[in-house]
Image (tube, rainbow, N blue to C red):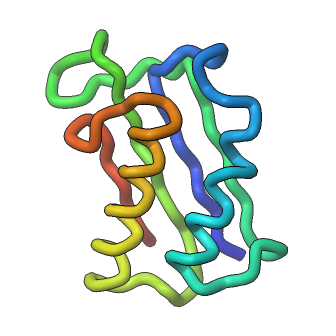
Amino acid sequence: MPLLRIFTNVPKNKIPKDFVDKVMPVMVAALGKPVEKMICVISGDTPVSFAGQSQEPAAVADLVSIGSLGPDENQRITRALSQFIQKEIGVPSNRSQEYGF
């Protein structure tokens, strides 16, 4: 069961209410796993220091999945997720970091 956790210093009121619903198709396409098996959590208003800066928008995401992860897959997933995060909550891709396990 893949688990995606996103921590961001973006205020909760700036995160769309349907963010977790909208990220699911991105993850289904990236992982090739059914949505019924996925969990997504986003925490806004979380103190994040990224490259020594804590006042600029930033995000950290970790993805835990059995299978569907590896060097090539991680690059593809990271690209898709960082583009989605930038579009939905305004965190530039150079201010987000994604990890896969």
Residue lying furthest top in this view?
55
Q: Residue at x 37, y 32 (%)?
A: 91
Q: Residue at x 63, y 18 (%)?
A: 12
In the rendering, at what x and y percent does residue 15 appear?
A: 61, 26
Horizontally, residue 50 falls left or right of residue 24, namely left
Q: Is residue 33 positioned above or below 62 on the image?
A: below
Residue 74: image quadrant is: bottom left
- Is residue 93 or residue 54 the one in the foreground? 93
In the rendering, at what x and y percent does residue 72 appear?
A: 28, 85
The quarter of the rendered structure image containing the N terminus is bottom right
Q: Is residue 38 positioned above or below 48 on the image?
A: below
Q: Is residue 95 positioned above or below 33 on the image?
A: above
Residue lying furthest right in this view?
36
In the rendering, at what x and y percent does residue 35 appear?
A: 76, 73
Residue 52: image quadrant is: top left
Residue 71: image quadrant is: bottom left
Q: Is residue 69 positioned above or below 13 on the image?
A: below
In the rendering, at what x and y percent does residue 81 appear?
A: 44, 56
Q: Residue at x 58, y 25 (%)?
A: 44
Horizontally, residue 101 falls left or right of residue 53, namely right
The quarter of the rendered structure image containing the C terminus is bottom left
